[in-house]
Image (cartoon, grey):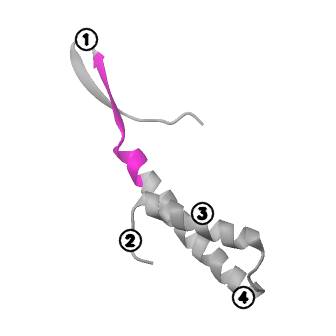
Amino acid sequence: MSKSNFEENIENLENIVNELEKGELNLDESISKFEEGIKISKECNKILEEAEKKITILLKKDEKIEETDFIADE
């Protein structure tokens, strides 16, 4: 799998899901597509984790700029 951007990965993952949902693939093809989907999913997760690490919030406090890590609400 070549390194592609997040949007391309999501589009590829959606295509795989659609193919699997149609139910027209034999078992071997389905397993192969599922494995490919897992790889793409892991790559998307890695891209998101890297992006989250880069996100920071600048807060102005006592006329000083503080940089703090972004913490997503779950």
Instruction: Write down the residue under mark 3.
Output: 14
Give the CA separation, mark 4 to mark 2: 25 Å
Near mark 2 (Cα within 10 A), the count class, few <14, some 14-19 or many ≥20, is few
Percent x, y for residue 51?
39, 49
Percent x, y for residue 26?
76, 86
Type of amino acid at the residue the image marks with label 1: Asp
Q: Determine which of the numbered discs, if any, sits on residue 3 in the image.
A: 2
Q: Earlier in the sequence, mark 3 or mark 2?
A: 2
Q: Determine which of the numbered discs, if any, sits on residue 72 in the image.
A: none
Near mark 4 (Cα within 10 A), the count class, few <14, some 14-19 or many ≥20, is few
Give the quarter of the figure containing the N terminus: bottom left
27 w.r.t. 2: above or below: below
What residue range appears in magenta?
Answer: 50-60
Give the CA separation, mark 1 to mark 3: 48 Å
Quarter occupied by residue 16: bottom right
Q: Determine which of the numbered discs, if any, sits on residue 62 in the image.
A: 1
Near mark 3 (Cα within 10 A), the count class, few <14, some 14-19 or many ≥20, is few
Label 3's element?
Answer: helix
The reply, left or right, for residue 65 in relation to residue 20 is left
